[in-house]
Image (cartoon, rainbow, N blue to C red):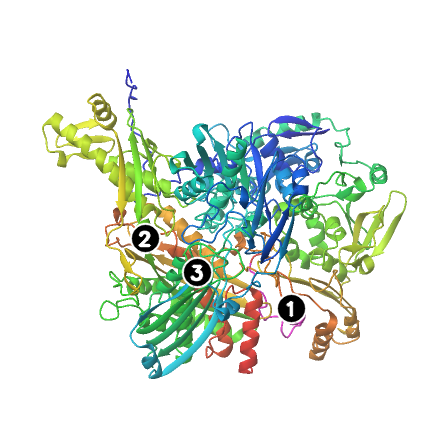
Amino acid sequence: MRKLIELPESPISDKQGRIGKSTKHESATRQVSGKARYTDDIPEQVNIAYAAVGTANQSSGRIIEINLTEVRKAPGVIDIITVDDVPGHTDIAPVFDGDPILADGQIKFHGQPVFAVLAESVTQARQAALKAQIKTSDENSEPACLSVADAKEKEHYVRPPYSMMRGDFAESYASSQHQITQQFDVGGQEHLYLEGQVSLALPEEQGRMMIYTSSQHPSEVQKLVAEVLDVKLHKVTVDMRRMGGGFGGKETQAAQWACLAALFAQRNQRAVKLRLPRMQDMITTGKRHPFSNSFSLGFNEEGLIQATKIEVAGNCGHSPDLSDAIVDRAMFHADNAYYLANCEIEGLRCKLNQVSHTAFRGFGGPQGMLVAEAMMDAIARQLKEDPLTIRKRNLYDDDKRNTTHYGMQVEHNLLPDLIEKLEASSDYWSRREAIRAFNETSPIIKKGLALTPVKFGISFTAKHLNQAGALLHIYTDGSIQINHGGTEMGQGLHTKIAQIVANEFGLPIDFIEVTSTRTDKVPNTSPTAASSGTDINGKAAQNACITVKERLAAFYAEQVKGDAEQVKFEDQKVTLGEHGIEFSELVQQAYMSRISLSASGFYKTPKIHYNREEAKGRPFFYFANGASVSEVSIDTLTGETKVERVDILHDVGNSINPAIDIGQIEGGFIQGMGWLTTEDLKWDETGRLISNNPATYKIPAIGDTPEVFNVDLYPRANEEDSIYNSKAVGEPPFMLAMSVWSAIKDAISSLSDYQVDPELSTPATPERIVDAVDKLIATQGF
Amino acid sequence: MISFMLNNEVEQISDVPPDLTLLNYLRENKKLTGSKEGCASGDCGACTVVIAEKNDSGKKLEYKAVNSCVTFLSALEGKQLITVEHLAKGEELHPVQQSLVDFHASQCGFCTPGFVMSMFALYHQSNEPNRDDVLHALSGNLCRCTGYRPIIDATLNACHNKQPDKFDLEEERTLAQLDALPREQQGIDGLYTPKTRQALANLKRNHPDARLFAGSTDLALESTQQLKTLNQLISVSQVPELNVLQEEENGVRIGAAVPLNKLKPLLLKHFPMLDELHWRFASMPIRNQATLGGNVANASPIGDMPPALLALNASIVVDNGENKRNIDINSFFTNYRQTQLATDEWIESIFIPYLPQDSISRAYKVSKRMEDDISAVCAVFNIEFDDKHQITRISSGFGGVAATPIKAVELKQLEGKNWAAKSTYELGTEILSQAFQPIDDVRASAEYRQKMITNLWRRFWLETNPSTARIQTRVISHA
C-alpha cells in the first residue's frame, strides 16, 4: 500500500480476552440478534436451485428398477441423478469402503437415499422426490439383519472382532471369591443438532467448486466432493463459518449432501442447496452406536476386581464408517477409572441393515464406560457396601495398579483426590442417610444417589489425525486475522483461539478476528472431533503467533540494540527493558521494513503411539477427569424420573475460558442424561426408524434441568505440555451423566433394601424403570 | 388481503399460497433469516416469533410467542408480528438478548433466536416470574448445547431487572397503527377468515373440500411434514360464536376457537385438577395457538384434553350455520380419528358441567418426557359421593389405550360402594385390567400402557383416601 492506515489516538480497549477469563462467545451478540449466519441463511444467488433426495422404503433388497417418470414430470423439476450419473467415485466412505453416495444396486437400510432431484423450489424438489417407484427383488439379496443378536449369530461384522487383554482371565476368574455375570443393552442416540444437515454448492470458473456446508470436517468434504466430481482437490474449496450444533453428527455425515449438491451444481452450472428436512435428517444420518454389552466379573471380599471378561458389541449399521475406532474407544474405556487386573475385552462390530452409525460425543467411550460402572454397582450390592466405597477401592492408584489394560500408565492420577473433594462438597454421606430414611417411609416415590467418575483419553486414536494448522495475518493497524483447521459448532473454539492469539500478542480480544474455516487457508485439516479442537488448533495458532512474534522481536531488538529473547508483548505494547512501543506502531514499522506479518503454524501431538496388533501403547496424550453426584426420584408406579440435584467437579486443567468450559460441562451432562433416560431410538420390525422426529424422540427440555446444579472446575494444571496446560472438555463431561443411571438403579435397589442390583438397560425410560421395579418385586417377593 | 404489521412496517398480502407458513414467509419472502427452521413441526421452537395484539380492553398490547413453522398467515390479521431482528434498538440489545450474552447462554446459537422471542414474550407478560414460570415460558424451546441452566438464569435476570423497552415506549403508536389497518377483507384466495357464523357456513358450502382450522398447530403438519398442498383453508378463529368463554348456570362454555392459554384461567378456576394436564399440553407457544375445539375435532386417541372431557361428562355443540346439535362427549368419538361431525358441521363450543361439591377428580399423564411430550397413557378419574362416602357416580377418560379417547364404562360397577374400602380399589383394578387392549408404538409397549391404566388407578386411590393421602406419589415438583 502507498499510505499507511492512520492509527487511533488512544487505542486501549477494555475488551480483555486473557487466558482464564470468561470472554464472551465470539458470536454471542450476533446469535441473540438473529444476525449469526448459518449455511441456510447465506443470501441466495439468483440462479439457485434446490435438491432433495428420494429414499428406499425397505431395509434390504436388490434394486431392479428406479422408475423416475413421475418425478421428471413433477412441477419445477430440473434434473435427477442416480448413482449411475456420478462421474467420479461413488463411494464416499471416510475410512473403509461401504457408503455409496446413492444406493448402488443393493438397498442397505430403510430410508437410504436412492436418487436425488433438483427443482426450482424446496417444496417442489421434496414433493417430486416422493413420486418415484423403486422396484426391488429379494433374489440374490440377503435377508435384512435387524438385530445385534442376529448379527452376532451370523457373524455379520463390518470389521473383524478385536480384543485387548492382560493377565490370565480364566484362572483368576475361577479362583475369585465372588463371580457375577451380566448383560445389558445401551441405546444409541440421535444427535438432534438444532440445525439440520445443509450444503450449498456454487460452480465457479475453470471447473472449480465452492462449497458452504455445516460440517465438522471441511477437508474431508473437499476431498470427497473432488472425488465424486472427478476433479483434483485444488478445484474444490470448502468454507465453514459455523454449525448449529454438531456433536459428531457432522463429522462424516455432512459430506453426502455436499457431494450431491456439488454434482447438481456441476451438471447444471447453477448454485444448488440441499437441506434435509428434519425427519429425513433423522432417518438418513447415522447415530450414536447402540451397544449390547456383557461381562463376567470375579472379585474378592474387599470388592476389588480380580478378573473381567467384557464383550462390547456395537451396532454399526450397514457399513464401517468410523466404527472400527468407535468400538476400539469403547474397549479403551471399558475400565473407565478402575484397574482391571486380569481381563479380556472383546469388541464386535455388528453389521445390520440400519443407517451406518457414526461419531457422537464420546465416540464409543460412553458405551464402554457403562460396563465399568455396571460392574461397580454389581459388586456393591453383592457385598452390601455403598457403591461409592467400591468405586473408590477400585480406582487406579499411583503404585502398582496404575496401568491400563492396553498398557498405558495412568500418570498424574488425580481422581482419588477429586472424588474426595466432591464427596465432601456434595455432602454425599449425610445425603445417603437422608435418602435411606426417606425411602423407608415412602412406598411409591424412591430416591437414589450415585457418584460416578470419568477418565477419558484425549487424542484421536488414528495417530495421523493428531495434527493441526493455522494461518495468522497481522494487518497494518495491528489487527489480526487468525484462521485454523478447527470448526466452530458452538463449543467456543473460535473464542478460545482468539484468546490465545490475544494473549500471545498482549492485545485486547477485539484486535483478533477468527475467520471461517476454509480449505484454501489451512489445508489438509483433521475433523473437529475427539475433543481435540482447542488442544491441537490452539497450539497451531500459538505456533503461528510465535513465528511472527520472533520476527517482530528481532526487528525491535535490533532497533533498540537489545536481546530479542527479552522482548515482551503485553498490554498492547512491545517492550524490551526500558524501551517500549505501541504494538500497532511496531507493526507499521515492520511493514515499512519489509518484515513478513503473516505466518502459518503447525502442531502435532507428542508422545502418542499404539500398536494395534499387540493392543498395547499410549494412544492418549493425557486423560481428562471428572466426577458427578446425582440424586434422583423415581415413581415406582409410572417410572417417571426426576433428577433433583447434580454436583460436578471436573478437570479442565488450566481453564482458558471458565464460562465456556462450564458450558461444555453442563451441556454435556444434560445431553448425556438425555441419552441415558428419555432419548429412545425405536425401529419397527421392518427396520424403519419410527422415532424419527422431535415429537417422538425426546431430548431433554428445559424442565429437565436439575434445580440444584453445582458445577466446579478442579483447579490443577495439565502436567502435559498442552496449550496453556489446559485440558480438552468437549466429550468428557458427557459421561458424567452416568451417575444419573446409577442413581436410578440405586433408587430401584432400595426396594430390596439395597440387596439386589437391578437390571436396567438404557435409556432408562419410564417403561424400563417400571419393568425393572416389577421384576425386582417379583423376584424378591416384595 | 391480509393486513398486519411486520415489526414496524405495515404489510398487506394477497398473492401467496394459502398454506404458506409464517416461517417460510419470513425466511423466503422477506429474507429475514433470524428465525430458524429446526423441525418445521412445532417441536423445537427455533422458529419462535411473537405476535402482539390488542388485549381485551383494547388499550394495551399483549405479546404471545408462537411457532412460526406451524402458523398460517391468517393468524396475523390485524396484529403485529415481531421477529428477532427487531428487538435491538440499533446496536443496543434488548434486555433479554443482553442477558443471554452476559450469562453465556448461547453456544451454537441456532436455538437462540427462538429462546430470545419466548423470553421477550415472558418479559412483557410477567413481573418477577419465578423459576417455574420461566420453565413454562420456555417449554417449547429445545437447546441441545447448554443444558439450559444459563438460559434459566439469564431469563430470571432479565425479567427481574425489567425496564420499559422500546415496545412499551412505542405501544401507543403501534396500537394506532393496528387500528388503522384495513379490516373488511375476508382473507386471501384459498385462505379464508370468516367473521360471522353465516360467512363460515357459506364458505364451507362453497368450498366443501376446504379444511377448517383454528390454531393450525396440527393441520400445518400435513403441509410441512407430509408435503401436502393445502389449497383451501378456512380459519374459524374470528367467528364470535366460537370465541365465547363463559360461566353458565350449570357449567362453563368454551368456544372451540379459544386458545388453550386463553381458556386456562376459567378452566382451572372450576377444574383445578386439570392444571398439570394443561401445563403439560405441548408447550407454551403451541398452547398460545392450539384450541380445545381443535383437540376435540382431530379426535386423536392421544390428545390430552379429550380424556378430561370424557371424565367430566362434557358435551359438544356442533353447528352447520342453520342447526345446532348438542352431542354427548361419550358418543362423539366414533372410530380412529372419526367423530360424529357431519361434513357440513363444525364444533362451536364445548360445555363442561360444574363438579358437584362431593366429588374428587384427578388427571394424570404419563410420557417419556415431562414437558412437551405426547401421552403414553392419559387417565382422568372423577368420583361423586353421597354423604356416607358411597360412590354415586364414577366417570373416567383415557388416552393412548384405544383407537379413540375412551372411558371405562365398566367402572360403573363401583357405584354404591365405599371409596375408602380396599375392595373397591381392587374391583376397579380388576375391571381396568381388562377394559382395553392398548397397542405397541413408538411411545410405549402395550404391556406398559396396560400397567399404567391400573397403576394410575392405584395412584388415584392412594391420593384420595385419607389413610394414604400423605404418601408422596409424584416426582414432579414444579406446576
Magenta region: B451-477
Residue A510: give x, y in percent of width and height.
34, 32
Few, some or many C-alpha atoms within 10 Å of disc 1 (few <14, some 14-19, many ≥20)? many
In the image: residue A408, left or right of residue A368: left
- For label 2, count other residues whose C-alpha is less than 10 Å away and answer few (under 14), some (14-19) or many (20+): many
Numbered tag placed on residue A652 in the rendering: 2
Check disc 3 and give the amino acid type: Ala
Q: Which residue bears the numbered disc 3?
A: A737
Circle 3 chain: A
Q: CA distance from mark 2 to mark 1?
A: 44 Å
Up-down relation of residue A298 to residue A108 (above or below): below
Check the picture and name the quadrant holding the C terminus of chain A: bottom right
Looking at marks 3 and 2 on the same chain, the residue that comes earlier in the sequence is marked by 2
Q: Quadrant of residue B430?
A: bottom right
Sort mark 3 into few (<14), some (14-19) or many (20+) by Cα contacts within 10 Å.
many
Compared with A254, A156 (above or below) is below
The answer for which chain carries disc 1 is B
Which percent across, then down, holds residue A167?
29, 74
A87 or A542, nearer to the observer: A87
- Specify the label residue B452 is tagged with: 1
Residue at (26% x, 67% y) in the render? A403
Residue B473 forms part of the magenta stretch: yes
Q: CA distance from mark 3 to mark 2?
A: 17 Å
